Amino acid sequence: MIISVQLIAQDQYVKRTYTTQKIAVQTPIIDGLLNDEAWNSVPWAEEFTVQDPNNGDAPKNQTQFKILYDDQHLYIAYRCFHDEPGKIESRLGRRDNFPGDWIEINIDSYNDNNTAYSFTLSVSGVKGDEFITGNGNNWDSNWNPIWYGKANIDREGWTAEMKIPFSQLRFGFQEEYTWGFNITRRDFGADERSSWQHRPQNVPGFVSNFSDLLGISGIKPKKQVEIQPYITTGVTTSPAEEGNPFEDGTSLRRNIGLDGKIGITSDMTLDFTVNPDFGQVEADPSALNLDGFQIFFDERRPFFIENANLFSQSVSRLEAGGPFGNDNLFYSRRIGSQPSGYVSLPDNSYSSRPDFTSIIGAAKFSGKSKNGWSVGILESITAEEKVSIDLNGSRSAEIIEPLTNYFVGTLSKDLNEGQSILGGSFTAVNRSLSNTDLEDQFHKTAYSGGLNVFHSWKDREWRLRGNFFFSNVAGTPEKIQHTQESFEHYFQRPDANHLSVNNSKSSLSGHGGTLSLGNYGGADNISFQSGLTWRSPGLELNDIGFLNTADQIDFVTWAGYRFPRPFGIFRSFRINYNIYSRWTYNWEHLYYATNFNAHAGFTNYWRMGTGLTWEIKDISTKALFGGPKLRQSAGLAYWMYMQSDERKKIIFGTQIFGFAATGRDKGAVNVRSYSFRVNYQPTDALRLSVSPRYFRQNRVIQNVSFSEFNNEDRYITGRVLQETFNISLRANYSLTPNLTIQYWGQPFISKGNYSEFKYITDPLANQYLGRFSLYDDLQLSTSENKEVYYIDENRDGVIDYDFSNPDFNFLQWRSNLVFRWEYSPSSELFLVWTQSSTNFGDPEKEIFPSLNDDLFDGSSTNTFLFKLTYRFY
């Protein structure tokens, strides 16, 4: 075994080399004790360096390691010294929880300076594994390979052993291999991370800065073959509804399915699932907004999460973020979502709709060749879904979701050792709409695709990015007209001279892209990026992707400075400055703001951050929901967060956000949000968490309805006072690293009360009082039950138009209790209890009394599920 160093590129960066050996005696038993004869054949590699926070220093406690291999496996031994072994933190948790002290090896088996496989083992025996892409920018913790690891505490600290099958790594055949690798240790008590291959803070990149692992030869890449069948059974209970044949109080659930992973070649793998069931997945948190924008929910289903980074095609790719941060050509939540078709139901009938669209099957083909070609293909078919209808005992069914095929394909090529990447992507949705009544409700086809370019130079310090994409949807003229008039497009806006609705078109096309240039790192520790992203009016991605809005051009500039060393009371400190500007696609200026934010870690191990955004101009094309542009009240937004020492048994943190209109619009908008979090770890096995959040907004102009009077449009708005409160409750109990019980529950309430109704007269007036005309008592009246407001605009005693009372009080309860036992590597048993309840309370009631009285006043649904999987490999 040989350890060497090699000076490269930057004076402060020294690349290290480790040469391993093949085992000539009995292979080690993985028990964490390091007493096997094989380990005596190689000396310890040592001299770790702090990565964070005191970058470049010697760590408080040093670490050593050894690496061996045989024809089937890679073996790693670790010696983690500790001056006080009694203070080693041996917390338990679920897989990928990364609790307490841990050690980690990252392996770039492609040796492409861009992707890697990460294996983490805590001192308590909890395993974590992640697939790294984007040179360290993306970590996929849902990659779950089969490997082995044990740890042990002794008088000198703690030790660990890992055994990683080569079948879990991807690489092309070579006579001799050079792999990138690095080993990182987390010293929980010192709140310190140290690594064998030191990467100075001002050196950009992650995987590209690994050390070299040499000496592996005579092995052949392994083709994975793993099959995982499953069975589920369960029962759902809810209050029976008299006379409703679909709501008798109980429904049974039985299912079988199959997941698999097959190595087509040594570096290309096919993942598939047949009739998948995701009953063990935690429910989405409750949410409600008034602005009309889609709510983005994270993917939680295992099949779609694993290797998701290979298929993600972000639209913006800008460091400073913005309202377009979630826009993507592929949003996997579209597959298997709730059926969205509708049918007219007969009077006095009962109906039953499925909660989700069934996924018949899905497959992913992915990998990377030894010459730098990366490929990802995803194919999925969802079933035709029907609503069941009962009319006086006569049963019928109507289609509400067509049989649909989803396709995603990506292809990219690494150039110049990964410093440049050229890629492309394509998505397709094809629906079977013949013999259905859904032609006017769905696009028959939806296609999108694009090209991605990434180029870096000066050791990846400078980076140029560009992505260019298109979309095309096709369907009946009625459906295409609906798309043009939808929230994302609003072609009907009366003041949009560059837009008009065409009711004869049977397709709609659009395009967009992003261009950015940035500098990351360098000796001065200053980073910056400037970029422009655009979306043409006809861009439509929401059949298989995610798009918040089209007809928009955004410009962002970001600059940041990170202090390279601790100083004074600070363990770390960084500051950022951002500039945002926005236009319509016709270059009508909409928005301008600047932002400053700072983040600090302190010597007492607390963390804190704060920021201030000055909105100078804010004009919305969405606020009147298809009406003209509306000048929003600009002002100051502020936020702050704080977190206590995360090494302690009790951890608490808080976040505060506020916005207040300023200048001539002072008093027009006031928004406040407070959240608090407390984590309590009474034992290594038990972790409790409580996270309440309160949100309040008082807004003078909030859209309510639309009407017409004397051939003039009336965009009706009102003052809204909205309050939202929720609290997340979590409990995690780990009996062993492979046996856990997890609970999550969330009560949620959001109520809004409207007053001061008005209609818009001059939407772009500089002062908010000039933008509307307030209805007086002679113009405004209500129905006896206060469910309808009547408007007599000309005060002639005749009702001119009306609108529904927009007040609301929405309550929801969601919870999951999951018992999980990994009884064999990657083979699991789940016992799940899911409970949900939705209710609508009295809007006149105060928020907390309503939460107490009305949360469970409606019907509750309980689901009990048993799921068993077994992984053959």
Image (spheres, grey):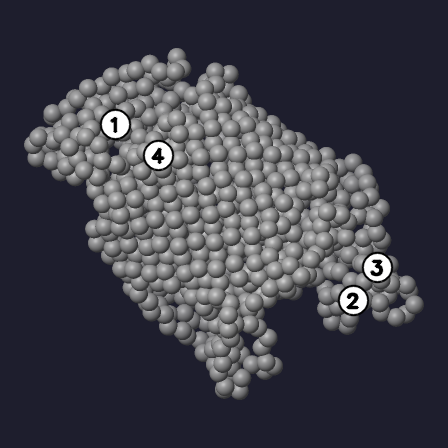
CA–CA distance in space, label 3 to label 1: 73 Å
Residue 436 spot, x, y in % from top left:
52, 72
* Residue kind at label 1, given as amino acid type: Thr
Q: Earlier in the sequence, mark 2 or mark 1?
A: 1
Q: Quadrant of the N terminus?
A: top left
Q: Quadrant of residue 219?
A: top left
CA–CA distance in space, label 4 to label 2: 64 Å
Q: Earlier in the sequence, mark 4 or mark 2?
A: 4
Looking at the rendered image, the disc whose residue lies closer to the viewer, 3 or 4, is 4
CA–CA distance in space, label 1 to label 4: 15 Å
Residue 520 spot, x, y in % from top left:
49, 24
Looking at the rendered image, the disc whose residue lies closer to the viewer, 4 or 2, is 4
Nearer to us in this view, 3 or 739: 3
Q: Quadrant of residue 631?
A: top right
Q: Which residue is mark 1?
A: 178
Looking at the rendered image, the disc whose residue lies closer to the viewer, 3 or 1, is 1
Q: Residue at x 30, y 56 (%)?
A: 259
Q: Which residue is mark 3?
A: 712
Q: Which residue is mark 2?
A: 802
Q: Secondary structure at mark 4?
A: loop
Task: Please indicate whether residue 461 sits to the left or right of residue 636 in the image.
Answer: left
Task: Work out whether 481 lies above or below 730.
Answer: below
* Residue kind at label 4, given as amino acid type: Gly
Marks 3 & 1, CB-CB < 8 Å contact: no
Q: Secondary structure at mark 3?
A: strand
* Residue kind at label 2, given as amino acid type: Asp
Crowdedness of circle 4 by 10 Å Cα count: few (<14), some, many (20+)?
some
Q: Earlier in the sequence, mark 3 or mark 1?
A: 1
What is the residue that sits farthest to the left in this orientation? 25
Task: Work out whether 210 lies above or below 730.
Answer: above
